[in-house]
Amino acid sequence: MRETQEREFDEFVLARQQKLLRTAFLLCGDWHLAEDLTQNALAKVYLAWNRVQRVESVEAYVHRVLFRTYIDTYRRRRKQEILSAAVPETAGVEPASDVRMALLTALGKITPRYRAVLVLRFWEDWSVGDTADALGISTGTVKSHTHRGLEQLRSVLGDQVLDFVL
């Protein structure tokens, strides 16, 4: 029985790991941190895989674990690290467009909960209900976080908002 569960977990990870990694990157803005975040979340899911298989949407559950792990990590890191204005160079990453870089930078400046909602709603193209299920919050909270997150994003982007509209 244990072998079957491990095989099912391995199949799940192989099928969804890249998507989870992209989502994690959008949350933290760094591929190395995204890999760590994804691995930590998947380790938590592995430990509870027997229970996870009984939930209605395994993917929503895994996303919830990913987002909660991100928020917990962000809280700890915020207390320990001093952020720098200089961005380190990363090897092997495709150069992104100015608009993409501006958006990623702006996403990095809004609160983690708002960022999580915006990533699910607009990057992953999830519905309000699916986002609420994944994050374990009400649909009303998703709507208010979306509104407030977009306000924060607009205030961070300033005049660059026109670049996204035009």
Image (spheres, rainbow, N blue to C red):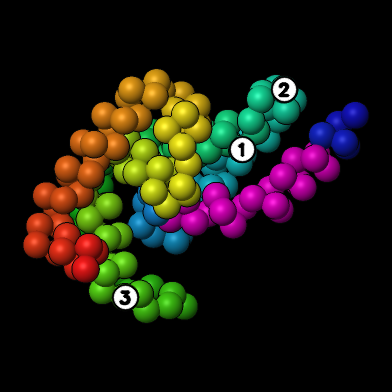
Q: Position of residue 157 (x, y in %)?
A: 15, 57
Q: Quadrant of the C terminus?
A: bottom left
| First to last magenta residue range | 6-25
Q: Residue at x 11, y 49 (%)?
A: 155
Residue placed most toward the observer, 12 or 125: 125
Helix, strand or loop at label 3? It is loop
Q: Quadrant of the N terminus?
A: top right
User: Relative to residue 39, is residue 61 depicted above or below?
Assistant: above
Helix, strand or loop at label 2? It is loop
Q: Residue at x 27, y 60 (%)?
A: 103
* Of the image marks 2 and 1, the number of the one nearer the N terminus: 2
Q: Residue at x 29, y 37 (%)?
A: 146
Disc sitting over residue 54 in the figure? 2
User: Relative to residue 127, is residue 139 depicted above or below?
Assistant: above
Residue that numbered label 1 is attached to: 59
Three-letter amino acid code of the residue under disc 3: Ser
Q: Residues within 10 Å of mark 3 (few under 14, many from 20)?
A: few
Three-letter amino acid code of the residue under disc 2: Arg
Three-letter amino acid code of the residue under disc 1: Glu
Is residue 110 within the magenta segment? no
Q: Position of residue 25 (x, y in %)?
A: 43, 55
Residue 121 horizontal side relative to residue 105, left or right: right
Residue that numbered label 3 is attached to: 97
